[in-house]
Image (cartoon, rainbow, N blue to C red):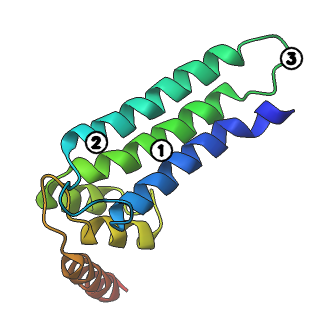
Amino acid sequence: YTLSSLEQYIPFCLMQTVRVVAEGKGIIHKAPLTMNGIEALDRSGSVLYRDLKGATAFDNSFWDVELAALSFERSASFMAMMELEMEELVAYYNANQTDFPESDFMLMFGMTGPRRQGDVGRFHMINRRDKKHSKKKS
């Protein structure tokens, strides 16, 4: 029974780690976030998924394979946003607005990463534009 919630709990912990890093907590200013750091976090998620899948692959396991795959894939997508350049992040947001809460996207837009300078104003500008377009359609 204890293993039954790991398929969502571990990806949730990974996403919380991404949120902490995106907020700039735990990052030393003399050693900013690098692609190596992001890739290491991503590899950690992959290794955890593989190891947990192997450890729970027995008869009568409560492990939900489909839910685990979906949860770990979602956390990997969330981590991948840290790698994107600003234009790529805008395109990802426009195509996947419902994948994550607005607060997570706002956090990602505000994060300065290895390939982008944070600009939360850009997020607000996109939201205002989208709201204007949806009002015109109504």
- Mark 1: which secondary structure? helix
Three-letter amino acid code of the residue under disc 1: Arg
Q: Check disc 2 and report the residue beneath it.
A: 37
Mark 1, residue position? 74
Q: Quadrant of the N terminus?
A: top right
N-terminal of the pair, mark 2 or mark 3, is: 2
Query: Residue 7: horizontal and vertical position, in percent?
Result: 66, 36
Q: Name the mark nearer the viewer: 2 or 3.
A: 2
Q: Amino acid at mark 2?
A: Gly
Look at the numbered disc 3 and give the secondary structure of its residue: loop
Q: Please tell me whether residue 12 is drawn above or below residue 60 in the rendered image.
A: below
Report the residue at 33% width, 88% height from top. Answer: 135
Quarter of image, res 61: top right
Q: Earlier in the sequence, mark 2 or mark 1?
A: 2
Q: Quadrant of the C terminus?
A: bottom left
The correct choice, above or below, for 30 with respect to 60 in the image is below
Answer left or right for 117 relative to 47: left
- Closer to the camera, 85 or 26? 26
Residue at image coords 20%, 54%? 31
Q: Residue at x 47, y 37 (%)?
A: 73
CA separation in Å, label 2 and label 3: 37 Å
Label number found at residue 60: 3
Find the distance from the CA under tag 3 to the CA under tag 1.
26 Å
36 or 123, which lies in front?
36
Which amino acid type corresponds to the residue marked 3 in the rendered image?
Asn
Q: Is residue 67 above or below residue 122?
A: above
Cβ–Cβ under 8 Å for marks 2 and 3: no
Mark 2: which secondary structure? helix
Q: Nearer the viewer, mark 2 or mark 1?
A: 2
Q: Is residue 116 left or right of residue 6?
A: left
